[in-house]
Image (cartoon, rainbow, N blue to C red):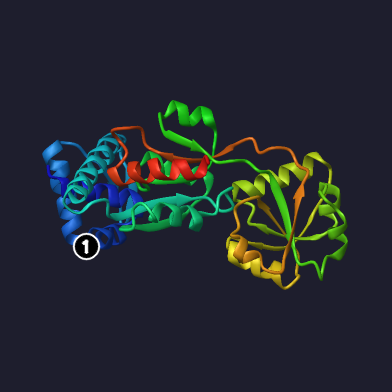
Amino acid sequence: MDIKQLIYLCNLERERHFGRAAEASFVTQPTLSMRLKNLERELGLSLINRSNNFAGFTPEGDRVLAWAREIVSVYQGLKLEVESLKHGVNGTLRVGVVPQCSVALPQLLKAVKARYPQLDYRIAVLSADQLLEALNSHTVDVGIGFFEMATLRELHFQTAMLADRGVEAVFHPEHFPDLLQHETLTLQTLAQQPLCLAEPTRYFRRYLDMAFREATFTPRVIVESASIMQLLQCTQVGLGVLVSPIGHLLPESLHGLAQRPINVTKMPREAALVIAEPGRATPLAQHFFDEARGYVTA
């Protein structure tokens, strides 16, 4: 057994396809298949359900995969630690984020860059549930999203809470002048406007839908998208009113737009910056977390 076999196994779990796993491993598909079959022979276990295509892992494969994730994570952490000892804190940090969390990610990265200018970032946009799974499987180093605090405590994650400043409506004042007369908007007033909202699979959208249902209002969603950029551009041309957590959007992106807080119940989940527990977090993740924690809790 060697580390490459375990990396191939983890890549197969992530890609769920032999060809894509081979590409992610920078080998040919026959090489990947051969190395994984060799691993099965060495262990004396069948790890993978094979048909014409990848058909998932056997129960034994799931057990081995859990160990493989841990070993690969430690191995990658060791490589990063060696690099940081030789060259300082540098490398690529894998960041998982949910759309519309209560922090402007570019500002956070800029703040950390002042301390660690050689850090690079690969950002994955995930649902809240996908983010928790990615943190558990070590496919991201840092998570920024909405979590249940009991779950984070149970999994021993290091957590920095993000300030919850509420929810706001963002709109073009020329197209929605009546909204300027309100200091705070109610859900009833908001339900009378055309809205630009994230797609229904996103946690923040599910939270809004629940709030409207509980208030017995049916909003008109004129634009629905997975892209926050598209929602913001639709708002800028006056198609509708964007609803967002306060602090999510860069002030520079709101040029010409007006903002009003919304009177709505607090989200059941809480926004947080999360990494693995001490000793399991990669060195880059720990450096980033220690620096970013001061920014998000300031």
* Number of numbered discs visible in the structure rendering: 1
Dividing the picture into quadrants, the one containing residue 164 is: top right
Q: Looking at the image, is 216 positioned above or below residue 34?
A: above
Return the residue found at the far bottom. Answer: 237
Q: Position of residue 36 (x, y in %)?
A: 19, 49
- Determine if residue 231 is in view: no
Dividing the picture into quadrants, the one containing residue 64 is: top left
Of the pair 100 and 191, the residue shown nearer to us: 100
Residue ID for mark 1: 26
Relative to residue 286, is residue 215 drawn left or right?
A: right
Q: Please report the residue visible at 43 percent of the width from the left and 42 percent of the height from the top.
A: 133
Relative to residue 183, is residue 52 drawn left or right?
A: left
Q: Position of residue 244 (x, y in %)?
A: 66, 53
Q: Position of residue 58 (x, y in %)?
A: 30, 39
Relative to residue 1, is residue 137 drawn left or right?
A: right
Task: Tell me the kind of residue under disc 1.
Answer: Phe
SS category of the residue bearing label 1: loop
- Determine if residue 40 is in view: yes
Relative to residue 226, is residue 45 drawn left or right?
A: left
Label 1, residues with CA under 10 Å away: few <14, some 14-19, many ≥20: few
Q: Looking at the image, is 36 positioned above or below residue 160?
A: below
Q: Position of residue 8 (x, y in %)?
A: 23, 51
Q: Please report the residue visible at 43 percent of the width from the left and 45 percent of the height from the top.
A: 292
Of the pair 43 and 161, the residue shown nearer to us: 161
Q: Quadrant of the N terminus?
A: top left
Q: Please report the residue visible at 32 percent of the width from the left and 39 percent of the height from the top.
A: 281
Q: Looking at the image, is 110 positioned above or below residue 164?
A: below
